[in-house]
Image: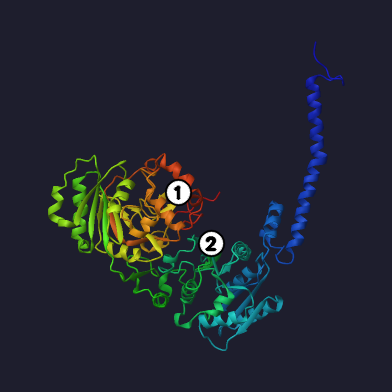
Amino acid sequence: MRFRYRSGLSGSEFVQKLKNRIKRLCRFVLLPALKIRRKLYYFMAYFLFRRDFSVNSEPLRSMLREDPRALLKRVRALKMRPLMSIVMPVYNTEAGVLRKSIDSVLGQIYKRWELCICDDGSTMTDIPDILKGYAKRESRIKVQTSGRNHGIAKAINKGVGMASGEYLGVLDHDDELDPMTLWEYAGKINEKPDADCIYCDEDKIDENGNYCEPWFKSDWNPDMSLSFNYVMHFAVYRRRLFERLGGVRSAYEGSQDYDILLRVAERTDKIYHIPRVLYHWRKSTDSIASGPEAKPEIFERGLAALQDALNRRGIEGTAEHAPDAWKGVFRVRRKLNLPLTCSVVIASSGDNAGLLRLLDSIKSTGIISSIHEILVCIHSSSGMETDEFSGPYGDCVRFIRFGGKDTVPRAFNSGIEHALGDVIWLMDESMEILSSQSYYELSAQAQREDVGAVGGKIFYPNGFIEHAGVILGPFGILGYAHRMTPDTPGYVGLKNMICNYSAVLGLGMMTRRMVFINSCGFNEEFEKAYWDVDYCLRLRQDGYLVTYTPYAKFRHYISVPSLDEMIIEPEAELFRKKWKHVIERDPYYNPNLTRDLEDFSFSPIS
């Protein structure tokens, strides 16, 4: 006998009736309620935006349509809504281009801005009328005209004299801002209220008006800032600090933006980066956006600004044009100020031929005279013969036998316990020193109180690069910058400039002995891999910089490992757990760059 409900319906009939009622409830009650709620968020957001945001901007209207609740939450988070002053020096700009530049300011979603334009004695007769027309229709636009051309530096300072905003930035008269630029900067100021300087990623506008050549930058990178003006556009400064420094200087005309960045960096470390393309740099025949040959004098003034910065900072050394690098990349050649003693510590697996090759490279490059001692660390179980090394190198070479596990971090920790040098230079017998500059370049960086570790450029036997810094994030863990690429300048010239990374490879690394001891050495839990990166990240936690220099060069006699061989378990899992936050966001590796390769190519747009 089939069971029937009191209504007389069978079980299946009852379920179907219940489904129909739920559908009617969703259709006639819940969905309208949700639509009303969404409209409510829309109108709440709309009316909240009207004072400080451009509600007629298409990007904002699109965000309002897509998710008004999320947008409302984001706007409410902007507790501080500072006035932003945009300074625009103008001189003989093509009318259409000038209008596009000004219109890009008018099109900002964030409305709390003022545009301070200084016409620096333009001889093109239509420019005054264009500027007057904009100033007449928009009260936030201020215009001042010079009787003659004084140059961009003085024009910027005149624009700054008109500014009243808490923050200011310079927009070149032929470039454009993204509609979201000031919104993003206001967001960063709310996130980092102590910000004294903020900059963003940028791209270029070609002759057909297309966006091209995106430049995805590092977060604040002190050593890169001494190698070239990587901040460029759109640098926004706290106005009080900018004015306290006296504004930009005419002595560095054309590189005045680099000079002010260097001077600001001497007063503050509150410099923050927005990893998003918010500035469009127009390529033209008279702009270095189209190539360095357009204004070669700019790079000489940039070099002079850098030398001036070294003098102010008390850094003994000279600023030079970097060899084998892009025009505009500089090299700071530091003087060795300290009477450093160096202990070379070599982890040996018993390969006599490899050890001889390494020792011969130390001798042939002339480095041996600068070395206090060479400590070769071999496991107590090794039957390695050491007699053949005593003659050629005399008392310089000592063999340290260690017990416990036979691992590289254990070997180095044991060797450094016996080391006497001020600095420790780590290698193994698969390495060969290629450049006589290697010791000098590493020591010049390692002597700095703000640097915890320094590494160089390492090549595979096939001539391709193995290492030019370590980047966190690729393959879900890490990669070696520019691995398996030829020895060319690379993305924005990074391979051939001194800069900071989160880590460097342990082989070839130099670190001060007391820094190593105070950091408790290498973590021997990372038996097979990642011990060096873990050490560098702990140095970063302690406030030290980790520096890469392309002028220390090595060859590493190993076969090129596959991706599977680069990820070593169980160490990889331990490393991921410990350093998850850096893997997710390496400050020196832009999130817009790929995590699938190590060549600094771009992430695919999802």
Q: In the image, what residue type sits under mark 2?
A: Tyr
The alpha-carbon separation of the residues under discs 2 and 1 comes to: 27 Å
Number of other residues with Cα within 10 Å of mark 2, as a class: few under 14, some 14 to 19, many 20 or more: some
Residue 148 pos. (x, y %): 54, 88
Can residue 487 be seen here? The reply is no
Q: Name the residue: 35% across, 50% down.
A: 484
Q: How is the image coloured?
A: rainbow
Q: Nearer the viewer, residue 350 or 320?
A: 350
- In the image, residue 522 sits, relative to residue 445, either above or below, namely above
Is 120 displayed left or right of 37 in the figure?
left
Residue 289 pos. (x, y %): 47, 69
Which sits earlier in the primary sequence, circle 2 or circle 1? 2
Q: Nearer the viewer, residue 288 or 569?
A: 569
Q: Nearer the viewer, residue 488 or 221?
A: 221
Residue 60 pos. (x, y %): 68, 59
Q: Which mark is residue 211?
A: 2
Q: Residue furthest top?
A: 1
Q: Name the residue: 22% across, 53% down.
A: 358
Regarding mark 2 in the picture, which secondary structure is present there? strand
User: Mark 1 — residue?
Assistant: 474
Number of other residues with Cα within 10 Å of mark 1, as a class: few under 14, some 14 to 19, many 20 or more: some
Regarding mark 1 in the picture, which secondary structure is present there? helix
Can residue 318 be seen here? The reply is yes
